[in-house]
Amino acid sequence: MRAFFVGRFQPYHLGHHEVVKNVLQKVDELIIGIGSAQESHSLENPFTAGERVLMIDRAVDEIKRELGIDKKVYIIPLEDIYRNSLWVAHVCSMVPPFDVVYTNNPLVYRLFKEAGFKVMHTKMYNRNEYHGTEIRRKMLEGEDWEKYVPESVAEIIKEIDGIKRLRDISGRDF
């Protein structure tokens, strides 16, 4: 069985990591859709699609090693089309076929359900802590953010100088 899981992953954090780990134990293959792929260099979406692919790829490698599995994971950037009624068809045209969607996003759930897909809720993992907005705020404020993302993701954010990017685009003095 092949599953689909979508998010913006700005950044990919430990909440996402636990969902991916959980789903990988239930399916044969996983498609991870990177939503809003066209967005980058803003406070809400600071990382490029390519940077997010790298974050997810390295984090998934960690999961595979930890679980001792070698399942296929497709990581596919998906640009927004700003037409909810057409979005599922757009996604389906951009990714391999899949059997089930995993999400906790009410709109994503509704759209895929209406399109006839099997949709499963995922367990939420410390949603108050593992939330992209809060992690980006911690990055901006110089607080400890690294404990909220997989180690490999923290390394990539440092490698691309992601904190400086966030601070530069915030327009704030530090």
Image (cartoon, grey):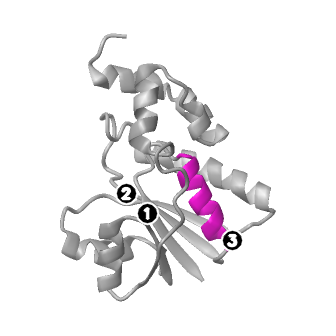
Is 4 or 78 nearer to us in this picture?
Answer: 4
Marks 1 and 3, how far apart at CA: 17 Å
Q: Which label lies toward us, 2 or 3? A: 3
Task: Examine the rendered structure and indicate whether residue 27 appears above or below residue 128.
Answer: below
| Coordinates of residue 157 in the picture (x, y in percent) | 53, 32
Of pointers 2 and 1, the one earlier in the residue sequence: 1
Horizontal relation, residue 171 to residue 51: left or right: left
Q: Is residue 16 magenta?
A: yes
Q: What residue is pinned by disc 3?
A: 25
Number of disc labels = 3
Q: Quadrant of residue 30?
A: bottom right
Mark 2, residues whose alpha carbon is within 10 Å: few (<14), some, or many (≥20)?
Answer: some
The rendered magenta stretch, by its main secondary structure, is classed as helix
Q: Secondary structure at mark 1?
A: strand
Quarter of the rendering occupied by the N terminus:
bottom right
Marks 2 and 3, how far apart at CA: 23 Å
Q: Magenta residues?
A: 13-25
Q: What residue is pinned by disc 2?
A: 35
Quarter of the rendering occupied by the C terminus:
top left
Give the amino acid type for the residue marked by disc 2 in the picture.
Answer: Gly
Q: What residue is pinned by disc 1?
A: 6
Task: Examine the rendered structure and indicate whether residue 51 appears above or below residue 94.
Answer: above
